[in-house]
Image (cartoon, rainbow, N blue to C red):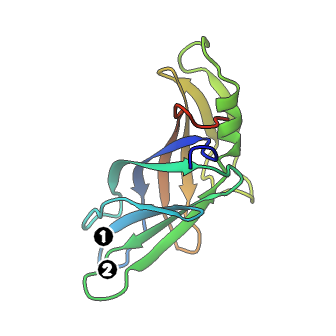
Amino acid sequence: MVEHLLGLLRVRVARGVNLAVRDVTTSDPYVVLRMGKQKLKTRVIKKNTNPVWNEDLTLCIEDPSLPVRLQVFDKDRFTKDDAMGHAEFDIRPFLEAVKMNPQGVPEGTIIRKVVPCRQNCLAEESVVRWCHGQVTQDLALRLKDVERGEVELQLQWVDIPGAKGL
Protein backbone atom coordinates (compact mmCIF):
# COMPACT_ATOMS: atom_id res chain seq x y z
CA MET A 1 0.00 0.00 0.00
CA VAL A 2 2.68 2.52 1.03
CA GLU A 3 4.69 2.17 -2.23
CA HIS A 4 1.88 3.86 -4.22
CA LEU A 5 0.86 6.31 -1.53
CA LEU A 6 2.11 9.87 -2.07
CA GLY A 7 0.71 11.25 1.17
CA LEU A 8 -2.53 12.35 2.78
CA LEU A 9 -4.80 15.22 1.88
CA ARG A 10 -6.61 16.62 4.90
CA VAL A 11 -9.80 18.32 3.76
CA ARG A 12 -11.39 20.54 6.38
CA VAL A 13 -15.07 20.83 5.45
CA ALA A 14 -15.64 24.22 7.04
CA ARG A 15 -19.20 25.22 6.24
CA GLY A 16 -22.06 25.40 3.79
CA VAL A 17 -23.39 28.76 2.64
CA ASN A 18 -27.01 29.36 1.59
CA LEU A 19 -27.68 25.69 0.84
CA ALA A 20 -30.89 24.60 -0.84
CA VAL A 21 -34.03 23.86 1.17
CA ARG A 22 -35.04 20.20 0.80
CA ASP A 23 -37.41 19.78 3.74
CA VAL A 24 -40.35 22.14 4.27
CA THR A 25 -38.39 25.19 5.43
CA THR A 26 -34.84 23.94 5.95
CA SER A 27 -32.48 20.99 5.38
CA ASP A 28 -30.39 18.52 7.38
CA PRO A 29 -27.18 18.63 5.31
CA TYR A 30 -24.08 16.49 5.25
CA VAL A 31 -21.16 16.29 2.81
CA VAL A 32 -19.74 13.23 1.05
CA LEU A 33 -16.19 13.39 -0.37
CA ARG A 34 -15.07 10.85 -2.96
CA MET A 35 -11.77 10.25 -4.65
CA GLY A 36 -11.33 7.05 -6.60
CA LYS A 37 -12.69 4.27 -4.36
CA GLN A 38 -12.49 6.37 -1.17
CA LYS A 39 -15.69 7.77 0.32
CA LEU A 40 -15.86 9.91 3.47
CA LYS A 41 -18.72 11.85 5.02
CA THR A 42 -19.34 14.55 7.57
CA ARG A 43 -21.88 14.43 10.34
CA VAL A 44 -25.42 15.69 9.69
CA ILE A 45 -26.24 19.23 10.85
CA LYS A 46 -29.95 19.36 11.62
CA LYS A 47 -32.26 22.14 10.40
CA ASN A 48 -29.63 24.43 8.90
CA THR A 49 -28.99 25.82 5.41
CA ASN A 50 -25.78 27.53 6.63
CA PRO A 51 -24.19 24.60 8.51
CA VAL A 52 -20.78 24.76 10.18
CA TRP A 53 -19.09 21.37 10.15
CA ASN A 54 -15.41 22.26 10.77
CA GLU A 55 -14.71 18.59 10.21
CA ASP A 56 -11.46 17.09 8.90
CA LEU A 57 -11.73 14.28 6.36
CA THR A 58 -8.48 12.66 5.21
CA LEU A 59 -7.95 11.16 1.75
CA CYS A 60 -5.04 8.88 0.81
CA ILE A 61 -3.47 10.26 -2.36
CA GLU A 62 -2.16 7.70 -4.84
CA ASP A 63 -3.20 9.30 -8.14
CA PRO A 64 -3.20 13.12 -7.97
CA SER A 65 -4.85 13.38 -11.40
CA LEU A 66 -8.14 12.11 -9.95
CA PRO A 67 -10.57 14.89 -9.04
CA VAL A 68 -12.04 15.11 -5.55
CA ARG A 69 -15.84 14.95 -5.83
CA LEU A 70 -18.02 16.58 -3.21
CA GLN A 71 -21.75 15.96 -2.82
CA VAL A 72 -24.16 17.55 -0.37
CA PHE A 73 -27.22 15.63 0.78
CA ASP A 74 -30.22 16.33 2.98
CA LYS A 75 -30.66 13.53 5.53
CA ASP A 76 -34.16 12.08 5.50
CA ARG A 77 -35.43 9.60 8.03
CA PHE A 78 -37.90 7.56 5.97
CA THR A 79 -36.93 8.20 2.35
CA LYS A 80 -33.77 8.35 0.26
CA ASP A 81 -31.58 11.34 1.16
CA ASP A 82 -32.12 14.30 -1.17
CA ALA A 83 -29.28 15.60 -3.35
CA MET A 84 -28.39 19.22 -2.62
CA GLY A 85 -25.77 19.73 -5.31
CA HIS A 86 -22.25 18.61 -6.10
CA ALA A 87 -18.87 20.00 -7.08
CA GLU A 88 -15.42 18.72 -7.84
CA PHE A 89 -11.94 20.13 -7.62
CA ASP A 90 -8.49 19.35 -8.97
CA ILE A 91 -5.76 18.95 -6.35
CA ARG A 92 -2.85 19.28 -8.82
CA PRO A 93 -2.38 23.08 -8.40
CA PHE A 94 -2.25 22.53 -4.63
CA LEU A 95 0.21 19.63 -4.94
CA GLU A 96 2.47 21.67 -7.25
CA ALA A 97 2.71 24.28 -4.47
CA VAL A 98 3.47 21.54 -1.89
CA LYS A 99 6.27 20.21 -4.17
CA MET A 100 7.92 23.65 -4.11
CA ASN A 101 8.62 23.01 -0.41
CA PRO A 102 8.41 26.70 0.49
CA GLN A 103 10.21 26.37 3.86
CA GLY A 104 11.46 29.69 5.16
CA VAL A 105 9.03 31.96 3.32
CA PRO A 106 7.20 34.51 5.48
CA GLU A 107 3.99 33.40 7.24
CA GLY A 108 0.94 34.00 5.03
CA THR A 109 2.90 34.11 1.74
CA ILE A 110 0.67 33.40 -1.26
CA ILE A 111 2.30 30.66 -3.31
CA ARG A 112 -0.24 30.60 -6.12
CA LYS A 113 -3.77 31.60 -7.05
CA VAL A 114 -6.38 29.49 -8.79
CA VAL A 115 -9.03 31.50 -10.59
CA PRO A 116 -12.62 30.38 -11.23
CA CYS A 117 -13.23 29.00 -14.73
CA ARG A 118 -15.50 26.57 -16.54
CA GLN A 119 -13.18 23.68 -15.65
CA ASN A 120 -13.56 24.15 -11.90
CA CYS A 121 -16.37 24.84 -9.43
CA LEU A 122 -14.70 27.76 -7.67
CA ALA A 123 -17.07 30.50 -6.53
CA GLU A 124 -14.15 32.90 -6.11
CA GLU A 125 -10.38 33.02 -6.52
CA SER A 126 -8.69 30.35 -4.41
CA VAL A 127 -5.35 31.05 -2.75
CA VAL A 128 -2.63 28.52 -1.90
CA ARG A 129 -0.53 29.94 0.94
CA TRP A 130 2.14 29.12 3.50
CA CYS A 131 0.47 29.08 6.90
CA HIS A 132 1.84 27.78 10.24
CA GLY A 133 4.62 25.83 8.51
CA GLN A 134 2.27 24.17 6.01
CA VAL A 135 0.90 24.70 2.53
CA THR A 136 -2.87 25.30 2.72
CA GLN A 137 -5.55 26.14 0.18
CA ASP A 138 -8.93 27.71 0.91
CA LEU A 139 -11.69 26.83 -1.54
CA ALA A 140 -15.24 28.12 -1.92
CA LEU A 141 -17.03 25.69 -4.25
CA ARG A 142 -20.26 26.60 -6.00
CA LEU A 143 -22.56 23.58 -6.07
CA LYS A 144 -23.85 22.35 -9.45
CA ASP A 145 -27.29 21.01 -10.39
CA VAL A 146 -28.99 22.89 -7.58
CA GLU A 147 -30.64 26.28 -7.24
CA ARG A 148 -28.05 27.65 -4.81
CA GLY A 149 -25.32 26.88 -2.31
CA GLU A 150 -21.59 26.84 -1.72
CA VAL A 151 -19.27 24.75 0.44
CA GLU A 152 -16.07 26.15 1.95
CA LEU A 153 -13.07 23.87 2.36
CA GLN A 154 -9.45 24.08 3.38
CA LEU A 155 -6.81 21.67 2.05
CA GLN A 156 -3.69 20.64 3.96
CA TRP A 157 -0.99 18.16 2.94
CA VAL A 158 0.26 15.48 5.33
CA ASP A 159 3.53 13.71 4.55
CA ILE A 160 3.77 10.08 5.61
CA PRO A 161 7.10 8.53 6.63
CA GLY A 162 7.85 5.67 4.20
CA ALA A 163 5.47 6.94 1.52
CA LYS A 164 6.72 7.75 -1.95
CA GLY A 165 6.06 11.46 -1.45
CA LEU A 166 5.51 14.06 -4.14
Crowd around label 1: few <14 · some 14–19 · many ≥20 (10 Å): many
Q: Can you identify the residue that label 1 sits on?
A: 28
Residue at 45%, 64% in the rendered image? 32
Residue at 65%, 22% in the rendered image? 101
Q: Nearer the viewer, mark 2 or mark 1?
A: 1
- Check the image and report above or below for 75 versus 51: below
- Check the image and report above or below for 81 versus 67: below
* Residue 40 visible to an observer of this rendering: yes
Rendering coords of residue 68 (x, y %) = 59, 57
Residue at 56%, 55% in the rendered image? 141
Rendering coords of residue 129 (x, y %) = 59, 28
Residue 162 circle label? none
Q: Can you identify the residue that label 2 sits on?
A: 23
Q: Is residue 71 left or right of residue 74?
A: right
Quarter holding residue 87: bottom right
What distance separates the C-alpha of mark 2 from that of mark 1?
Answer: 8 Å
**Can you name the residue that lies furthest to the right here?**
118
Amino acid, disc 2: Asp
Amino acid, disc 1: Asp
Rendering coords of residue 152 (x, y %) = 48, 49
Between residue 88 and residue 36, name the one nearer to us: 36
- Check the image and report above or below for 72 versus 77: above
